[in-house]
Amino acid sequence: MEIWTGFIVGLLGSVHCVGMCGPIAVALPVLGGTQFQIMIGRALYNFGRVITYSLMGALFGLFGSRLILFGLQQDLSILLGSIILIYVLLPRKWKAKIFDTTFYKRIKTFIVSRFAILISKRSISSLLIIGLLNGLLPCGFVYIGIAGAASTADWLHGAAYMALFGFGTFPIMFAASILGKIINLNIRQRINKLIPALTVILALLFILRGLNLGIPFISPKFACPNASHQQEVECNH
């Protein structure tokens, strides 16, 4: 997956982020009396999210690189695309059940409880830590980003992919933390209707990439790791 698509995924999903994490951003404590100090604090919160996303990207990029050694890069791309496609097509009540499991509830409860403690501290460092923890909250769009990071099959590219994903969510989340509800419900609902269609397109790109069709940028040919040119030709056939 091309690294720059991480920014696109984050930008498209940022409206969803406002719905999920907007209340946290709005509830952030106000530190200092100047607008500049407030903006610095909000920026630190959002940079905290970007750092967490980057670390997750590095981890899953490394995981993807291990699969390349076994010649499974194409299979990984097709599998991830299929999982994303299935998730989008699942009925809403089934999706709700996925995030209603004990495992997810415990993670969310733990993180939210830490938010309350950190918000009460009203310090610059606490805003950064809130952002770091915010990045760990269960979120379907973050998982799509992680899938993209894994498909880069390299820890550095995976980190870069998720960093761009985080920066894609940055503008709206930063504005939400400063201005509160910047997008009215009607506009947000209209944009949210487009998200499934855009996610399907992304899933299809994953699948096409794994099919090894030789289409530049969309479905490039994969080379066998540690192979000669002749072996690469044989691999691609």
Image (cartoon, rainbow, N blue to C red):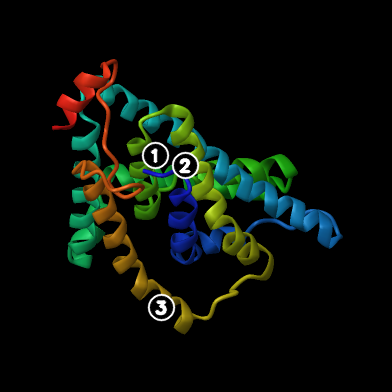
**Label 3 neighbour load within 10 Å: few <14, some 14-19, many 20+:** few
Q: Does dot 1 land on a helix, a strand or a loop?
A: helix
Tell me residue 22's x, y (percent). Answer: 53, 63
In this rendered view, identify the residue nearer to me: 11 or 192: 11
* Residue in view at x 56 percent, y 44 percent: 50
Any mark on residue 189, and which? Answer: 3
In this rendered view, identify the residue nearer to me: 134 or 230: 230
Any mark on residue 149, and which? Answer: 1
Q: In terms of sequence position, does the residue under pointer 1 or pointer 3 come before the other?
A: 1
Q: CA distance from mark 1 to mark 2?
A: 6 Å
Q: CA distance from mark 1 to mark 3?
A: 28 Å
Disc 3 marks a residue whose amino acid type is Gln
Disc 1 marks a residue whose amino acid type is Ala
Horizontal side of 233 relative to 127 (left or right) equals left
Q: Does dot 3 land on a helix, a strand or a loop?
A: helix
Q: Which numbered mark, 1 or 3, is in the foreground of this view?
A: 1
Check contact, mark 1 vs mark 2: CB within 8 A: yes
Tell me residue 205's x, y (percent). Answer: 28, 53
Picture quadrant where residue 28 is located: bottom right
Q: Which residue is mark 2?
A: 161
Q: Is residue 69 visible?
A: yes
Residue 231, relative to residue 12: is it above or below? Answer: above
Q: Does dot 2 land on a helix, a strand or a loop?
A: helix
Picture quadrant where residue 147 is located: top left
Q: In terms of sequence position, does the residue under pointer 1 or pointer 2 come before the other?
A: 1
Disc 2 marks a residue whose amino acid type is Tyr
Tell me residue 167's x, y (percent). Answer: 57, 51
